[in-house]
Amino acid sequence: MDINGVISAIFVGIVIGLIARILVPSMQPIGCIVTIIIGILAAFAGLWIASAANIDNFWLTFAIQIFIAVVLVAITAFLFRKSNTG
């Protein structure tokens, strides 16, 4: 992956993180920076899974990335909520 791919993945990751935050119901006790980091991680993980499965469809790859981000946002929000309640 060249530098353009990394920069694209970061920008796509920001969008994916924000979409995941919208899709996860309830108030999340996590900040925007954590959401963006989760989105970037999900973008890279989804791209890796799609390339490992030989998926060349952009929309299917994007759906995989969003699914991963939704799961990670939900898990992170649960862990932050649990640690904040004492």
Image (spheres, grey):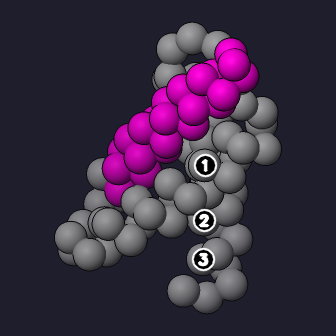
The residue lying toward the viewer, choosing from 65 and 4, is 65
In space, the residues marked 3 and 2 are separated at their CA atoms by 6 Å
* Residue at 78% across, 44% down: 33
Q: Do callouts 2 and 1 mark residues in contact (Cβ within 8 Å)?
A: no
* Mark 2 residue type: Ala
* Mark 3 crowdedness (10 Å alpha carbons): few <14, some 14-19, many ≥20: few
Q: From which residue to which does the magenta span run?
A: 61-86
View extreme (left): residue? 53
The residue lying toward the viewer, choosing from 84 and 10, is 84
Image spot of residue 21 (x, y percent): 59, 29
* Mark 3 residue type: Gly
Image spot of residue 7 (x, y percent): 70, 71
Residue labelled with disc 2? 9
Q: Is residue 57 above or below residue 30?
A: below
- Decide if residue 41 is in sight here: yes
* Mark 1 residue type: Ile
View extreme (front): residue? 86
* Mark 2 crowdedness (10 Å alpha carbons): few <14, some 14-19, many ≥20: many
Look at discs 2 and 1 and give the one toward the viewer.
1
Locate the N terminus and report the quarter of the image it occupies: bottom right
* Residue at 26% across, 75% down: 52
* Residue at 59% across, 49% down: 39
Is residue 59 toward the left or the right of residue 2 in the image? left
Residue labelled with disc 1? 38
Look at discs 1 and 3 and give the one toward the viewer.
1
Q: Do callouts 1 and 3 mark residues in contact (Cβ within 8 Å)?
A: no
